Each structure stands twice: as structure tokens, then as C-alpha cells.
Amino acid sequence: MTGLVRESRYRVEGMDCASCAAKIDTAVRRVVGVGDVSVSVTAATMTVRHADRGDVGPAILRKVAGLGYGLSPLTGEASPALSSAGEDACCGHAHAAGSADHAHGDAFRSAPSADLPNAGAAVPLRRAQPWWRTRKGRLTVACGVALAGAYGIGKLWPATEPWIFTLAMLVGLLPIARRAVMAASAGTPFSIEMLMTIAAAGAVIIGAGEEAAMVVFLFLIGELLEGIAAGKARASIEALTALVPKTALVDAEGGGLIEVSAESLPVGATILVRPGDRLAADGVVLSGESGIDEAPVTGESAPVLKGPGDSVFAGTVNGDGALRLRVTAAAADNTIARVIRLVEEAQEMKAPTERFIDRFSRTYTPAVALVAALVATVPPLFLGGLWQEWIYKGLALLLIGCPCALVISTPAAIAASLSAGARRGLLIKGGAVLETVGKVTAVAFDKTGTLTQGKPMVTDIIGFNRSETEVLSHAAALERGSSHPLAQAILSRAEADRVAVPAVSDVKALGGKGVSGRAAGADLFLGSPQEADRRVALTAEQKARVATLHDQGKTVSLLIADGRVAGALAMRDEPRPDAAAGVKALAGQGLRVIMLTGDNRCTAEAVAGRLGIEARAELLPQDKQRIVGELKAEGHVVAKVGDGINDAPALAAADVGIAVGGGTDVALETADAASLHGRVADIAAMVGLSRATMRNIHQNIAMALGLKGVFLVTTIVGVTGLWPAILADTGATVLVTVNALRLLWTPVEA
């Protein structure tokens, strides 16, 4: 494919199983101008990379519509021809939607709203129809009514049974046969529809019309159940859209408030959020203070206090205070929209296990069809068997040969797992990443902002000549108005301890040394131990106390009052409250935990000692990348966890890069996964979720192959016939899907 390349995303209606996705994938790839196709049955989406020509889009639509599926573009700029044709293909219930044509790797990036012309509909909440109103539901009901009528007529007029059951069967089989022919012409000759058509037609030929009608009816019931189960998985993540209110209160230019659609809120608008209301947009608090319930978005159980300057998410619930917010993202780019878009795109990326199963199924189905042909012909030709008996068994084997349950075993589990994680603030970019997370044997953490709070806190207040309260009060007086992180730490401690801060005069900042001034009738100086020692000689005891604090990785400031050392304050970037528990959970999973930091060795060892992990200190970004490479060379599968620009090289070098909440855009873009609320325990939760998913996949594969194996043997020995054979496929598919859905409600724990 040469020239300009375009990427388009579509919503596919009526695609309920993995074989559906495979047929669509094969058919669309045969369209002239198409370069690559990614189809997700669980998200009901398709992404196509194709030549930027006007004839490619309609050709894609015709191909998909010919297979019996509806197609609606997720661009918000759908041409009338595309939209109307998509509705025709799906019996009038295709849903127009809007979203960005979005590359997989950009899932964490906030795209400009100009790229999203139909911003509010970027991730539409599709209203699921009752099953009896869907096309498959109506067809199943019609086939059931025809079958019941055939039984009634057959009892009244037995002579009509041979053809009345054939007519009842055709009610359900004709649409199936049409799809089989279209799939074969599009490059999928061994589709379930083709196997079903051959089996039903063969049964009629050998005089088993009643069984053929029942098999078709059971097949339609199975397809209907698959659709219902698939819809449950999609609804679990799409329901997040319902969390965002439909309207918002906006400050009017002339004063007062006006109510507008939340979808129309522009970036920069000021909105009022009343107590108890849900937030209509992502934003920054301009005024007010309130506890925000972020559980719907991040999974954080306790309300988080927010004040001026703090960021808030759309869909979260305001507490008991009114807030004014400045909108920072359009409806299509708010946190919930990005989460849903990420999950849908991640579901289109196949995991290694899924790719293997796909390759296996392409060989498995033709092989079973060949075995069925041999079973039907070899015994009558060479062993004196009865033709009718062995043809019947061969037809049953055709139905057993459908790989639907096997093919859906992996994507159903992965889709449910991605959705479960996203609903709890754990974002994972695809099935391949999800599989790898479960194989991780070593986790390398950044220190600042990842294992620690990311800002210094006052840890020790020592009074030499004044009380601890006076030391803190005088230090806060000197630092009032300063934006330096150490100054902010002192002021925060004074506020937390409710210490009165006196007025200060003659304040002078002494570059690199400290700050001086006069407060409470005393001449004060607050600064480094070296400068304090130059001004007033420190005693041996005081020097020893300072040295001890330094050895603990703390920064020490000394306070001098009227020419005497009044006291000292020690500060350090402390571990997050959950860091110790999170590290312990990882160790309990058998993982090696290491901290990589650019900070000094004393500070690094102090933090690592408290958490019980090993540390590497004074590292440049390239050093972190090198150490990740060394861990991989030792045979470890490495996860790198960080939040800053200096983490980006190591995040990219690791087997899995994980960005934590509040991280920089660079870290989020480079990472394979992210934690919205940034708890250290989230990393262990990701590992646990991955391992639970792989167990679920193995269970699914065992169920799919086990049921087929059992029915294969029982069919050949003559214990079961056609209708149990169809249950071996549709029944297994439903069981596998329901088992995968368990992941939606499985607690995400370490």
C-alpha cells in the first residue's frame, strides 16, 4: 500500500463470537487499499489502516454488510452512505458514534478536541436492546415457532413430517447459509455457518429432517446466548459513560449561571459543582474545598480532599462543599472517555496466547472437517458399514469441529480483565502487556513520587535553646511566602500542628545559605548547618545530632535566635502510606523489588531500609536503563515503575513499563500500563489480575477442548448424535464466555 495512509475505527453490530471477528478480519483484508485490520469481538470495534481514497470506506462497508453485520464509523464525520448502509445491514439498529481515529500507542494522550468533531459522542453508551428485539432474537423466535408448528402439524398429519420439518429448518437455515456463502467468497470457507449448513442439509438428505430442524434451532439459541454474554462484557466498561452528567452549570458572561449540555463544554469554561453533584468535566479547582468521591474512576474508596489548584475527574462525586472548576478537557478527552477508548483499543491488540489459538484454529477446523469426511466414507467403503449411520456420525463431527469456544477462550478473558482493571484505575495497554505482567519476576521502582510522597515533610523538630513549638513557629515565620519545597514543608507542618506564626520583618533571602529576619522580638536565621556553624559555633552534641539526621537521608535546617542555636528541623521525602504494604505484597508474590533513584545514597538507603528493599542511588536516566538491562540479562522479566521524564528510557527498556498516577505525559506515553491513583499496592494488584486472567484462560481452553473431546468420542461410538454435537460447540462457547465474565467481579487484589 503506497501513498497516504488513514486509520479508521468502526463499531460492528451483530458480531458476538470470535469466528465472527475472524470472518470480518479476513474479508476486510481482501479489500483493495486495506493494509491492516484489528477486530475486537469483545469491544465490538474494528480499526482499519487503509489508503486515503474515497472508494475504500464504501468497499469496507459492502464487505462487512455482505457478511450480515452492521457497520458504523467512530469518527463523528460519517458520510450518509456509510451510516445508512450500516443501518440497513443491521436491521436499522446501528448506532452512530464519534471517536478519534486513534493509534493504539496514543491511548493515554489527550488529543486536541479539533480531532474529535463529534466530541460528546466519542465513547457512546449504546442502549442495549432486549434480546427479543434484536435480529438474532427475532430469527430464533421465528425458528422456534416454526419448529413447534411442525411438531403440531406432524402429529395431526404424520405424512407431512418429512417436508414440514424441512420447511421449519429452512426458516433458520437460509440466513445461516447466506452468511456461509458470503464468508466463503470473502476467504473463510470453513466457517461455523458453512459447517452448520452442510450438516443440516446432509441430515435432511439421509432422512433426519426433524433432528436437522432441532440442531438449527439450538444453534440459533447458542448464538443468541453468545450475543447476550458478549453484551454484558461490553456494557461493564461502557457504563462508565453514564457516570458523567448530561448538563453543567456555567458562569455566564453577564453574571449568574446557565445550564448547558456537558458535551458542549469548551476547554477553559468555568463551571459550578454543587454539593452532591457529579462533575461534568475534567478540571482544576478555582475556588472552594470539598471531599471528592473518586471511586467510580480510580477505585479510591475514601473521599479525597480537593482545593484550589487540585485536578479533578469527570464522573466523580462532589462532597459537601461547592466548587468552581476550570474545564481542562473536552467531553471526548476527559478521563472516562480516555479510559474507555484505551480499553477498546487494548482489546483489539491480540495477546500471544490468542495469536497462537488463532493459528491453531485455522488448522484445527479443516482437520476436523477432513476427519468427518473420512468417518462418513471409510467405514461404508472399506468396512461394510451402513452409509446412513456413518454419514450421520460424520455430520455430527462437522458440528463438533467449530472452533468458536476455543477461539473466544482468550479474548473473552482478556477483555473482561482489562475492563475490571480499568474500573479500578488500572489501565493496561492490551492483552500482550496483561500476559507479560503476570510473568514479571523483578520490579524496579523510581523513588521520588513513586515510592515516596514526592515532596519533603518535616520529620524531626529539635529544641536546643527553645521549645519545639517555638522552633517551628519562628521557622514558619521566616518561610512565610516562600514557594521553596522545604519552606512549604515547614509551613504545612505548622498548619497541621496549629502553631501560631508571628509576624516577621526585615526578611532577607541569603542565596544558598538560608533566610534571616526579625520576629517575636528576636533576630532570627534559618539555614544550612554549615552557615549556622559559621555564624555561631555548634557544640559537639549539636554536630552529632545533625550528622545522625544526615545519615538518615534527611535535610537539616538550623534556627539561630539572638545569636544562639535555638533548634533544628529535619525534612525528608517520606514513603507513601501504602508503600510498605505494597512492597510486602510484591515480595509475597515472589518478586524481587529494587529502587532506582538519582537521589544521594544516604537518602536512598534510608528509604529502602524502611521498606525492606535494595536500592541503587545517584543514577542518571541512562544508568536506570542500564540496570534494567542487567536485570533482564540475569533472566528476570522486569517491570519498571515511575512517574517522571527521567524514567522514560528505563520504562521503554523494561519488559513492562508502568506509570503511576500524577506522572508526566512522557512517562504515561512510554508506559505499557498505568495506575490512576498511583498506589504502590496497585502494582501487586496488576500482577494478581494478570495471573488470575491466565488461570481463567487455561480453564477456558480446557473446557473448550475437553467438551469437544468427550463428544468426539461419544459421537463415533454412537452414544450421541447431531443435537448434542451442536451443544458441544454452542454450550462450550457460552460456558467459556460466562467463566471469563467472572473476572469482571473478581476482586483486584495482590
Image (spheres, rainbow, N blue to C red):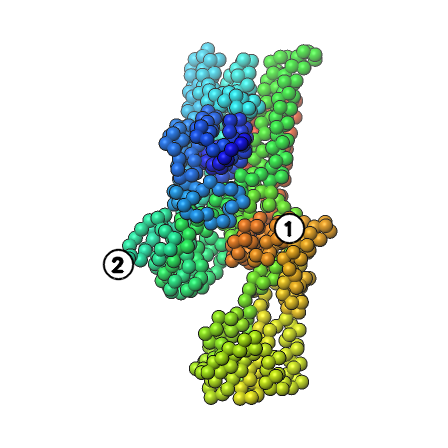
Image vertical order of residue 514 relative to residue 426, above or below:
below
Is any part of residue 159 visible from this angle?
yes
Q: Amino acid at mark 1?
A: Ala
Name the quarter where the N terminus is drawn. top right
- Location of residue 421 in the rendering, given as x and y in whole percent from the top left corner: 53, 49
Residue name at image x 28 percent, y 57 percent: 253
Residue name at image x 41 percent, y 45 percent: 114
- Location of residue 621 in the rendering, given as x and y in whole percent from the top left corner: 63, 57
**Residue 202 in which image quadrant:** top right
Real-space Cα separation, disc 2 to disc 1, in angstroms: 54 Å
Disc number for residue 419? none
Q: Nearer the viewer, residue 30 or 292?
A: 30
Residue tagged 2: 254
Residues at discs 2 and 1 in contact (Cβ within 8 Å):
no
- Location of residue 662 in the rendering, given as x and y in whole percent from the top left corner: 51, 58
Q: Amino acid at mark 2?
A: Gly
Residue tagged 1: 654
Q: Nearer the viewer, residue 108 or 357?
A: 108
- Location of residue 673 in the rendering, given as x and y in whole percent from the top left corner: 56, 50
Is any part of residue 48 visible from this angle?
no
Helix, strand or loop at mark 1: loop
Residue name at image x 30 percent, y 53 percent: 259
Residue name at image x 51 percent, y 46 percent: 107
Dot 2 crowding, Cα within 10 Å, few <14, some 14–19, many 20+: few
Q: Nearer the viewer, residue 14 or 538?
A: 538
**Residue 355 in which image quadrant:** top right
